Image (cartoon, coloured by chain):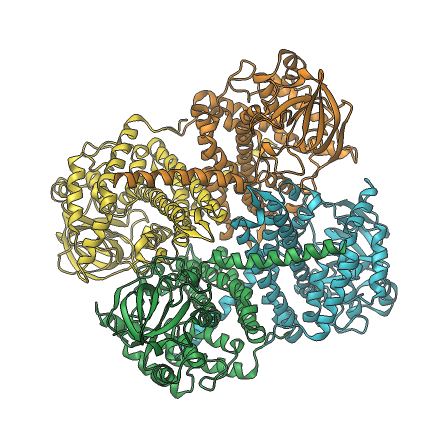
Chain colours: A yellow, B green, C cyan, D orange
Amino acid sequence: MDFEHNDRTKELIARVEKFMDDYIYPNEKTFAEQQAAFGADRWQVPAILDELKAKAREQGLWNMFLPDSDLGFGLSNLEYAPLCEIMGRVSFASEVFNCSAPDTGNMEVLERYGADWMKEKYLKPLLEGEIRSVFCMTEPAVASSDATNIQTEIRRDGDEYVINGTKWWSSGALDPRCKLFIVMGKTNPESNRHTQQSQIIVEPDMPGVTIKRNLPVFGFDDAPHGHAEIEFKDVRVPVENVILGEGRGFEIAQGRLGPGRIHHCMRTIGVAERALEKMCERLLTREAFGKKISEHSVWEQRVAEARTNIEMCRLLVLKAADMMDKVGNKIARTEIAMIKVAAPRMALKIIDDAIQAFGACGVTTDSGLARSYASMRTLRLADGPDEVHNRTIARLEYGKTGARMHAREAAE
Amino acid sequence: MDFEHNDRTKELIARVEKFMDDYIYPNEKTFAEQQAAFGADRWQVPAILDELKAKAREQGLWNMFLPDSDLGFGLSNLEYAPLCEIMGRVSFASEVFNCSAPDTGNMEVLERYGADWMKEKYLKPLLEGEIRSVFCMTEPAVASSDATNIQTEIRRDGDEYVINGTKWWSSGALDPRCKLFIVMGKTNPESNRHTQQSQIIVEPDMPGVTIKRNLPVFGFDDAPHGHAEIEFKDVRVPVENVILGEGRGFEIAQGRLGPGRIHHCMRTIGVAERALEKMCERLLTREAFGKKISEHSVWEQRVAEARTNIEMCRLLVLKAADMMDKVGNKIARTEIAMIKVAAPRMALKIIDDAIQAFGACGVTTDSGLARSYASMRTLRLADGPDEVHNRTIARLEYGKTGARMHAREAAE
Amino acid sequence: MDFEHNDRTKELIARVEKFMDDYIYPNEKTFAEQQAAFGADRWQVPAILDELKAKAREQGLWNMFLPDSDLGFGLSNLEYAPLCEIMGRVSFASEVFNCSAPDTGNMEVLERYGADWMKEKYLKPLLEGEIRSVFCMTEPAVASSDATNIQTEIRRDGDEYVINGTKWWSSGALDPRCKLFIVMGKTNPESNRHTQQSQIIVEPDMPGVTIKRNLPVFGFDDAPHGHAEIEFKDVRVPVENVILGEGRGFEIAQGRLGPGRIHHCMRTIGVAERALEKMCERLLTREAFGKKISEHSVWEQRVAEARTNIEMCRLLVLKAADMMDKVGNKIARTEIAMIKVAAPRMALKIIDDAIQAFGACGVTTDSGLARSYASMRTLRLADGPDEVHNRTIARLEYGKTGARMHAREAAE
Amino acid sequence: MDFEHNDRTKELIARVEKFMDDYIYPNEKTFAEQQAAFGADRWQVPAILDELKAKAREQGLWNMFLPDSDLGFGLSNLEYAPLCEIMGRVSFASEVFNCSAPDTGNMEVLERYGADWMKEKYLKPLLEGEIRSVFCMTEPAVASSDATNIQTEIRRDGDEYVINGTKWWSSGALDPRCKLFIVMGKTNPESNRHTQQSQIIVEPDMPGVTIKRNLPVFGFDDAPHGHAEIEFKDVRVPVENVILGEGRGFEIAQGRLGPGRIHHCMRTIGVAERALEKMCERLLTREAFGKKISEHSVWEQRVAEARTNIEMCRLLVLKAADMMDKVGNKIARTEIAMIKVAAPRMALKIIDDAIQAFGACGVTTDSGLARSYASMRTLRLADGPDEVHNRTIARLEYGKTGARMHAREAAE
C-alpha cells in the first residue's frame, strides 16, 4: 500500500497543472465573452476553444484517457484519475485535451469494437478532435438506467435497419461539430435480457432524425454542447452500422459505464476543489461584523469539512480506479457505485456552502457556482439514481452478512 | 390559543383555492407556451396574465395584501398568511391577484408615507395593476443587508437631487410595464447611522439610468420580471421625489422588511406544498423493481418528513404573523428571523427530494422543480444571509441567558 | 387562530414555573446526593421526593393531567401541554406533581374503564401518590408496537385467568412503591385482530411473577423507576381483574396511546429547553482562543437553530393537542405521529450540541446531558420506531394524492 | 500508488482475524458474564482476559504496536493500521494483544525517553502485560487540549518534586493492576509556552494521591478500566522520576498525540464495521409488514451509506498513517486532524442507525451498541473537540489560499 503517485503520473500532473495555469484559467473569461457575443444564436463554438486545443496538442497533452491502446498514453485508470480531476476544474477544459465525455466513451467503443471503416470514418477525426459524437441511450418514458427497459426499436429490413424511438439527455447533439450518434436500441426484443439490444451508428443528417429540443439543466442550456431530445422516425441505416454485431449492445454498454462513471467522479473532485478555492478566496477578501468572514468560526467548520470530504472522496475514486485496473470493472462495481453516490453529494454540499459565502453573487452566473451546482445535481440521477446504486451496495453487503451467518451456523 | 382560522379567513381561503383550481393551474401550460412563443425576445408579458388579472379583479380577489387600509381588504397578517401561501403555489399567481412583490411593499410604502401626488401618479395605477415597480436597495460591492453600508449617493443640488451609484438584484426592472423605481441611497452620509439614508422615486426613462444587464438565477432569467443591475449616473430628480423626507429612508425600510420577509415565507410554504404534491404524484405513477416507487420505504420517510416539516414551518409563519399583528414587527423580529431561515431550507430539501423522485425530468424545465429550487435558494441570501439572522436569534437567546444567570446570582 | 394561551393556562404556567424555581431546581442536587448515598442499593426513593410531593399537593398543583374528570383539573390537552413541558425540564419533576408516566395513563384507564373496586383499591392511592404502577405491553421477541403481535397468553381457567409470557421495558416495575401491573395479553387468539387482547390487573407479589432484570438505558438504570424484564409463569388472577371486559384490551390501548405519546412530546420540549439553557450558560462562561465561546459564530448558528427547532416543535405539539381536543385522537393521529418523530430528533440534536459545548463534562453524569440523551433516544423507538410513524404519515399523504389525482381525472 | 497491503501485513491480518474468530468473539459473552458475577464490586479483572492474553502471547500476537523498536514487531503505522482496526471490533480485544491505550502510548514514551531504571521497573512489566498504566493530562477546570493551560504544579523541593493538582479522565486509574501514572504538570511556569511542562512518574499508592471518583461515560463505568478524577495533594516524588528532563513534557506529549489519535481512529473503523455487521444481521432476521426489514429500501440506503462512509474513512486513516511514516507526524497533522473529526462522526451515525434497527434492544446493554455509542461520542471531545481540529484544518487551507492569491497577484 502506498499513497504516492508514481513518477510518470507526477510528471503528467505537473504538466497538466501548468497548462491550466498558463492557458485555461486565464481564458475562462474569454470563453464566456466569446459565448456572450453570440447573443441568442448560442449553438456555436467559441474560437478560443480551437486555439487552446491546438496548444494542448502541441504540448502532447492529448487523448490521455485511452487505456490499453497505442492511440492514447496507455495510462491505467489510477494514473489517469488525477489528470481527469484537474481537467474537471474548468467546464470546458476536458475538451481542450480531447478528453471529454461522451467522446471518450465513444472513442473507446470504436477502438475496441468498431469495424475498420468505422475507425477510419469516425474514430480518426474524433481522435483528431475534429468532430464530436453522442451516445443516445436514455429515454423519456422509462427508467433507462436499466438497459432492458429501452423501447427504441431497431428493426432489420433487408440490408438496412429501421430505427424508431425517442431519446433524451443525448448530450452533445446540439454541437455543430457533432457527426455521429451511437444509438442503443432493441434489435431482438424476444431474446434474453442481455442480448436484446444493439448499438448502431446514426448520422445526424440522416432522414428521420429530428432534434426536438434542448433540455436545459436548471436554466442552463450548456451550449455549445447541450442535451437534446431526439426523435428517430423510420431512420434507415445500412446493416454494417451495427457495432460488434446484433444483440451485443448490452455487452458494449457494460464496458463503457464503469469508466464513464468513474471519469465523472474524477472530474467531480476537481469541481469540488475549485468551489472550495473560490469559497476560501471570497471568505478571505470580504468582511462582516468587523472582521474577515474567514475568521468567523462557522466558516472554519465548513471549510474544514469541505477539505476532509474532498480528501475522502478522492481516495475512494483512486481506490476504485486501482481496482478497475487490477480486478476489472465487474468486481470493482461496488466501489464504483459507492463513489458514484458519494462524490456528487460531497461536491453539492461544498458548492452550496460556496454559494452561501458569495451571497447573491453565488446564485447568478458571475461566480460559476450555480452552473456547477446544476451540473453536479444531474450526476445524482445520470446513469441511475443514488437509490439504485445504494441498493446494489446494500445487497452485496447483505450477501456478505448472509454468508457470515451461514458459516457461523455451520461452525456451531 | 386556537389553531383554527376564523370564518372570514376560511371563506377567503376557499375562494382563492377555487380560483386557483378554475383558472391558475389550468393555465400554467398556457403561460409557458405563450412565453416560449416569444423566442429570444423574452421581456414581454404573456397575454394570459392580463386575462387572469381581469378575472381575479372581477371576483373581488384583488389587493388582499394591504393591511390597515381602506384600499385593501384590511386583513391582518395572520389572516393574509394562508392566502399568500396558496398564491405561492404557482410562480405567477401572486401577480394575478395584484399581490406580488415588490409591488406590495412599494404600494404599502406609498400608502403610508407617500405625498398626495405620488399616490395619484404611482399608487393608483399600481393598485389597478396597470404598472409595476422596483425597490432598488442591494448593491454589488457591499453587504447591503446592512443598510448603513449603502454607497449610492443622493446629493442635493438646488431643487434637484443628483443620484450616483449601482444597484443590483433590482427585481422587476426588466418588466416592460415597470414605471417606478424606489431608490435607497445616502443623502446625509455624515449623519448618525439611521438617518443617513433617503428613499427617492426615479423613473426608468430618466437620463442617466442604465439597465446594465439581467442577472440570471441558476440560469433562469425570470422573465418578464427579471433581476437587474442598474447604473445611476448623475440622475437628476426633483426634490419632491423624496419619500417622507430626507434622512428617513432607514425608517421606511424597517417598516417594509418585516412584512416583505414574512410574505416570502408564506409563499415558500406554498412552494413546498406544491413540490410535495408533485413528488407524491410521481411516486404513485412510476414503478421500479416491480412496485410503485411510493411503496419503497425510503420514499415513505422522505414524504413523511416533508409533510412534518411543512406543518412546523407553517405554524411558525402563522405565529410570526400573529405576533406582528399583536406586538408589532419589532418585537416579532426573532420569530421573523427564525422563519426567514427555516422556511427556505425546508422547501429546498423537499424540492431536492422531488427532483430525485422525478429523475432526469426533475433537473430540466418540464417539472418546474429546478426553477423552484433556484428561486428558493436565493431566499437564503436575500434580505440577509441565514448566518446573519441566526446571529440575531442567538444574541437574543444569550441575552435571556445572561439575565437568567444574573437573576440567579442575585437570588443567592 | 390565536397563539396566546388563555388566562387560566397562563396563571397555571406561572404557578408551576414558580414551584420549579422555588423547589425543584434547588433540589436537583439534593436528589442526586440522596440517591448516591444509597450506594449499590439503588432501588429506593430519595426522601426529598416525598417532601416535594407534599409541597406540590399543598399548593394544589396535583393531578393536573386528568382531562374530562372531576378528579383532576379538567384541563384540555392544549391547556395541559405547557404545564407538562415545564415539568419535563427535570427528570423527577412530573412525579412531584403526580403527573408522571405510566401512572397518568394507568389512572386514566382506571378512571374511564375500571370497576368500582379497582377505583377504590388502585385508583385512589394512585391519585394520592401513595403507590405506583406499571403498564406491561412490550415483549422482547416481537415488534409489539403492533398490538396484534403480542404473545402473552391470558387463558381462562374457571374463575381465574392464567397468565404466561414475558414482558420487557415495563417501566417502574422496580420501584419499591409499585403495587400494580396492567398487563396486556391475548385472551381470544382466534378472534379478529382487534378483539384478541385483554388488559388485566396483576399484583407484583402474586405467585409466578418474576422480575428477571433491570434494563439499563445507555448504562443508566433510571433508579428508582427502572425498566424491567418480567416473567409471568402460570400467574393466576381472579376473572374480575380484567378491565372493561374480555377482548377489549386493544380498545383500551388505543385510548391511552394518543395522550401518552403527546405527553412524552410535551416533556421532550421541556428537555430540549433545559439543554439549550445549559448550553448557553456554558458558552457564556467559558473562553477559547481569547474570547467567550458564545461569540464563536459556529455556536451562534447552533443556538439559533436550537431555538428555531424548539419553537417549531412546540407549535406542532400544541396543534396536535388542540386537534385531540377538537376532533379526537383518531383524526389527530397524523399530527401525533408527526410530532412523535420530530420532537425526539429535535431534542437529541440540541442535547448533542450541548454535550459538545460542555466538553468531557458533557458525556459524564455531571451535566445531566448524557442522561437526557439516553432518555430521548429511547423515544425514537418507544411506542413504535420513527419509520413506522413516518409510514403512517406517508400513507395518509399518498391517500390525499390519490384522491386529488382521481378528482382531476374525473374533471377532465 | 497502490491500494493493496503488502504480504507481511496480509499475513498478520489473517492471523489476527483468525484469533478473533477462534477466541475473542466466542468469549465476549464469557467476559460479560464474569463481569456480571462481580456484582457491585466491579473493579476486578475477569479471568478470561488473562487466559486470552496468554493465548495471544503464545501465538506471537503481542506488542504489535511498537514502531521502530526491537521490542515490538517493527511495523510501520500503515502496517499496524489494519491490525488495530480489527482489534477495535471488540472493546477488550486490544488488551488481549497488549496493544491497548493508554499503555501503548506510555510504553512508547518509556522506550524512547525513559531512563534505564524506568525501563526496568515499568516498561518491562508493561511489555509483559503484567501491570497497567495511566496518562494524567486532562484537568477539569481548563481546556487542557491546549497543554499550556495545564494548572497542575510540579515544584522542586530539594531532591524531590512536590505535585499539587487535580486531573480527570485519567483512564485506567481504577484498574487494580495499575501501577504507574505519568503526570503532566508545570515545573517552569515562567518559561516559554513549550518548556513549562514536565512529565513525571507517580505511583498510585504514594501519599497524597487520592482517586476521588469514577467518571461514567453516559451511564457506563467502563470497569475494570474506568476513567478517574484524581487529586494530587503535596505528593512527593524523587527528582529522577522526571522523564527526559525538566521542561520537556510538551515535547514528549507532541510525540505521543499523533499516534494516539490515529490508533483511536483505526479502532473506530473497527467499531463501525462491527456495528454494521450487527445491523445487517438484525435486518436479515427480523420482519415487519410482511417482509424482512433488510428489504425495506430505507435500510438499503442506510446500509449502503454506512459501507461507503466506512470505506472512505478507512482510506483516510491509512493515508494519514502512510504520511506519518513518510513525512512525520508534524506534516501529517492535517490528515490526522481530518480523520480525528471524521471517523467518530461516521461511527456514531452507523451505530445510531444500528440502534434504530435493533429497536428497544439497541438502547440497552444486550446489543453492545449503546456502549459503543457512548464510547465513540467521547472521541469527538477527547484530545480536543472537533471544532478545534476543524479550525486547524481551515487555517491551513486559508494559508494555501493566501499563498495562491499572492502568487497570482505577483504574476499580474
How far across and how far down the image is residue C10, in percent? 71, 71
Rendering coords of residue C189 (x, y %): 70, 60
Q: Quadrant of the C terminus of chain A?
A: top right
- Does D61 sit left or right of C133 as displayed? left
Spot occupied by residue B319 in the image (x, y as percentages of width and height): 57, 70
Count numbered badges in the picture: 0
Residue B315, quarter of the rendered image: bottom right
Q: Is residue B11 left or right of residue B137?
A: right
Q: Nearer the viewer, residue C205 or B211?
A: B211
Residue B299 in view, yes or no:
no
Between A132 and B178, the one nearer to me in the picture: B178
- The residue drawn where x is 71% and y is 44% is C366
- Quarter of the picture holding the N terminus of chain A: top left
Q: Residue furthest bottom?
A: B58
Res. B343 visible in picture: yes
In this view, B196 is above or below C31 = below
Q: Is residue C101 above or below residue D129?
A: below
A215 displayed left or right of C288 = left
Residue B170 in the image, given as x and y percentages of width and height: 34, 67
Report the side of A146 relative to B380 (left or right): left
Nearest the eye: B127 or B203: B203
- Name the residue at 49% across, 36% down: D337
